[in-house]
Amino acid sequence: IQDEATHKNKISIDSVFAYGNSPDLCTLVRERSEKANRCLVSALMGSKFQLMDHLKALKACLLLAQGDFTVLLVRKLADCLKPSASSAFSASGQHDIWTAVYSAIRGSNAVKLSKLEACLRVVIISNNSKGASSRSSGLDYAPPKPIDVVVHPQALALYRRLHDTMLARAFVEAHLNDTWRQYRLAERALNRLPAHIRLVLHRSALARGRMAQLVQALGQRYNTAVDANWAILVQQLKMGASLDQLILAHDTYLANVAIQVLLDPGLKLALDEEFSPADPVEETFTQDDCLSLAELLVAALQHASTFCALLTTYINDALVADHQSDRNTYRADLLSRLVTRLDEAISQFDDTSQRINTLLSTSNSLILSDFAIHLNASFSSFVKH
């Protein structure tokens, strides 16, 4: 009976491949394709390759959605990248950075992500501009086969870009928190300083609050963009019946997050061509406004970071001057110059904040309107009038 069934099946297949039998051939190809796709989707989403575990690791660590991991990572990387630390390009420096990342994983709930440690990579970047060199560090991900079919090189490049943007914001938030902590720890000693120094510190504390509100609101905006699109991705992956649908669902998720976070008009055009997302974020994309807001946000973070460094130096020098019996002219001049630079950094941040507020209130872009909803409450309290 089995031999007879095999013989009949062979005859039917031979007839399908007969010349001129296109409809039956198309039906056979479609049936075999659907069967192969079901097997691929089952293997990728099942326990064999665990696609969801890889995507969770990317979301938690490259998109910094794991809050406790992000806090530990930023703090430990900041220690490794201090000027007094070992060079990031030396063997010991690279080991210190990887140890910091490993400690952040082990010290947070990210340790529960099964695919993380095997695929996570550390990236060290050297920046040389205007005769000054600096080091920065971030994370990368190396998905194994066949996960790299879904998390392809173009998607990884976008993940890295998002990670750099989000990590820069997290570093500024950590610097602002450290500055506030330093002020509170030395508050009793600072209250004994002369009145003009206390006035500078009071003015700086108010400015630090305005900066912290913007940075925290920006972080909430990033988290909302990731979480909202992640929920849609999970639903689409559950309904995915083919490999192409899995790739499209992930590409659409990543495209939507990137457009909302990076505010890059050119990115949408590239994503439409490269990924063809099924649900674009907006139809009317105001290029000039989005570019302007992205540049203003970067400038605001830079001004806040400069402010933190200057305020830390000012507090330390003011305390040293107070303990010196001979308050020499050099120390007074140094403090005076620091006050000038502090005021300049505060003024630059407030001017940038005002321009951001004006742009958000006048733009017709749907993306910026959504952005304004998230940031409006914070802007109303810290914009300088």
Image (cartoon, grey):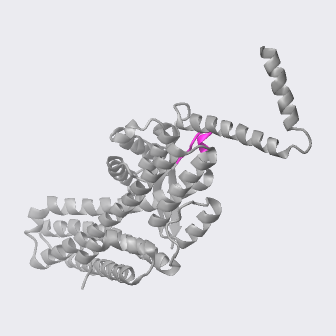
Determine whether 260 is above or below 198 in the image: above
Side of 276 where 74 appears, left or right: left
Which quadrant is home to the C terminus? bottom left
Residue found 28% across the figure and 63% down from its top:
176
x and y percent of residue 275 in the render? 61, 59
- Of residues 209 and 40, which is closer to you in this image? 40
Determine whether 11 is above or below 120 in the image: above
Determine whether 279 is above or below 119 in the image: below
Side of 3 where 277 appears, left or right: left
Determine whether 341 is above or below 245 in the image: below
- Magenta span of residues: 141-148
Q: Write down the quadrant of residue 364 in the picture.
A: bottom left
x and y percent of residue 256 in the render? 49, 61
Which quadrant is home to the N terminus? top right
Residue found 78% across the figure and 44% down from its top:
26
Is residue 303 something one can see in this rendering?
no
Side of 380 where 356 appears, left or right: right
- Of residues 71 and 201, which is closer to you in this image? 71
Q: Residue furthest right?
A: 19
Q: Residue furthest top?
A: 1
Q: Write down the quadrant of residue 303 in the picture.
A: bottom left
Side of 136 where 313 appears, left or right: left
Residue found 13% across the figure and 79% down from its top:
196
Residue found 53% across the figure and 60% down from its top:
255
Is residue 339 something one can see in this rendering?
yes
Numbered marks: total: 0
- Of residues 92 and 67, which is closer to you in this image? 67
x and y percent of residue 361 in the render? 35, 82
Dominant SS in magenta: loop
- Of residues 294 and 184, which is closer to you in this image? 294
x and y percent of residue 187 in the render? 12, 63
